[in-house]
């Protein structure tokens, strides 16, 4: 019932919602301007009645609506504030305070309403994504087996065809595309499955070294220098080594892909008694600010052939470790991502 009412309310055009507020404001302003209410009970409660359209505007239109309404209400008091009718200074200050109170009320109510709306939107988006994830996982599962067969047969025929055969190049494209689709399906299933960590003491230093050697060829081809900065005496940390390697690998691959030829990708490891962190910094052209909120959402990608699942999976893995993965900085001089893990042992419960 409430949901139906809300849905109906949402399809009402904005101007229709504005009309009752403006009408109320007009009536109250007319009473204020006229002398009808002078000295009566209405005159003393009139100022409080102005809060009615103010709350309505804030609730319906958030901060912006509330502030506009406060400004319209305050127009009524402008002549008194400016002392056109010879009001004493204390009287003028009183009225000024009252106008300020309208703005303050609009500000507080508006901020709360806006925050509430953003939260509702976020939850709705998360709900949609969860549903989409379930559907995608089911489809991915069904597609995996036939795709593996297509890829396998295509690869076999490709190998059997002699160099220069007119169909060889076409088959190579099929093999590449199927490999890409298989990767997408693998990552989709990986993202949608519950994560079970196998925690063991792991030297983060060694893990980063492994990632560097895995990425060496990619970096060399792209003309990128990989640099590691770490204290050689770093302690071992309880973590799922394979999963954390996946996280750092993804960050480094993204950094290499974003960097210009001749650039550097820096991996810095540091620790304190409470946490251990890895930063991956590149010298690429940065991530536009409007993309920052979407980076960790599944399927957000700006790359041709990208899956948009690398950061989403990495985020999930780091969170399962009780840590954080965040974008620290991104501008025209480069981008830095940071993984922070708690230094104490974890009692992990699968997510
Ligand atoms: P994919 O690499 O498949 O696109 P990711 O989830 O790893 O998926 O990354 C999502 C998007 O985030 C990328 O398409 C890219 O736009 C942006 N991104 C990630 N890392 C960087 C980086 N170091 N520099 C610039 N953009 C980045």
Image (cartoon, rainbow, N blue to C red):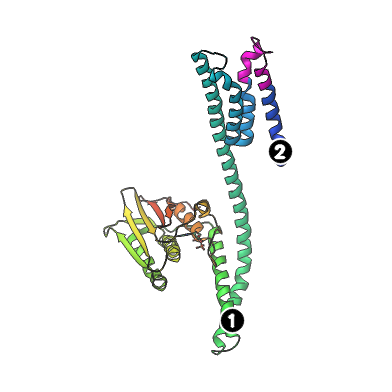
Q: Nearer the viewer, residue 76 or 186?
A: 76
Nearer to us in this view, 101 or 318? 101
Disc nearest the viewer among 2 and 1: 2
Q: Secondary structure at mark 2?
A: helix
Task: Let me know if residue 76 is in the magenta part.
Answer: no
Residue drawn where x is 52% and y is 25% of the image: 100
Numbered disc 1: secondary structure: helix
Q: Tell me how far mark 2 sits from mark 1, CA to CA.
A: 56 Å
Vertical arrangement, residue 177 with respect to residue 248, above or below: below
293, above or below 169, in the image: above
Q: Residue 274 placed where, x, y %?
A: 34, 47
**Residue 209 visible in the shown view:** no
Q: Position of residue 31 (x, y in %)?
A: 68, 18
Q: In this rendering, is residue 178 above or below 308?
A: below
Is ligand 1 closer than 8 angstroms to the Cβ of mark 2?
no
Q: Which residue lies at the image location 61% right of the left edge and 22% below the top edge? A: 76
Name the residue beneath numbered marker 2.
9
Q: How many marks?
A: 2
Which range of residues does the magenta coloring cover? 28-48
- The residue identified by callout 1 is 171
- On screen, residue 325 above or below 44: below
């Amino acid at each position: 019932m409430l949901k139906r009412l809300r849905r109906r309310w949402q399809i009402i055009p904005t101007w229709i919602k504005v009309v009752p507020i403006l009408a109320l404001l007009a009536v109250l302003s007319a009473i204020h301007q006229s002398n009808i209410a002078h000295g009566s009970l209405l005159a003393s409660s009139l100022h409080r009645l102005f809060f009615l359209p103010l709350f309505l505007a804030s609730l319906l239109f958030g901060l912006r609506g509330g502030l506009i309404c406060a400004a319209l209400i305050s127009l009524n008091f402008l002549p008194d504030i400016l002392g056109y009718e010879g009001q004493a200074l204390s009287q003028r200050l009183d009225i000024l305070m009252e106008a300020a109170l309208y703005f303050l009320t609009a500000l507080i109510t508006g901020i709360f309403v806006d925050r509430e709306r953003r939260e509702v939107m976020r939850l709705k988006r998360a709900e949609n994504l969860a549903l989409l994830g379930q559907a995608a996982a089911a489809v991915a599962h069904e597609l995996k087996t036939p795709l593996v067969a297509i890829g396998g047969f295509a690869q076999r025929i490709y190998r059997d065809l002699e160099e220069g055969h007119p169909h060889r190049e076409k088959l190579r494209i099929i093999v590449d595309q199927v490999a890409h689709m298989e990767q997408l399906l693998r990552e989709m299933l990986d993202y949608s499955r519950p994560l079970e960590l196998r925690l063991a003491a792991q030297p983060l230093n060694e893990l980063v070294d492994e990632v560097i050697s895995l990425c060496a060829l990619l970096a060399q081809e792209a003309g990128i220098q990989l640099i590691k900065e770490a204290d050689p005496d770093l302690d071992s940390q309880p973590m799922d080594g394979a999963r954390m390697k996946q996280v750092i690998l993804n960050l480094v691959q993204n950094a290499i892909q974003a960097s210009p030829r001749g650039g550097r990708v820096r991996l810095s490891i540091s620790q304190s008694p409470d946490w251990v962190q890895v930063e991956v910094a590149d010298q690429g052209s940065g991530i536009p600010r409007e993309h920052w909120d979407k980076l960790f959402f599944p399927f957000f990608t700006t790359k041709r052939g990208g899956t948009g699942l690398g950061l989403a999976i990495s985020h999930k893995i780091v969170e399962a470790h009780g840590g954080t993965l965040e974008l620290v900085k991104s501008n025209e001089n480069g981008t830095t991502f940071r993984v922070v893990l708690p230094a104490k042992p974890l009692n992990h419960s699968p997510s």
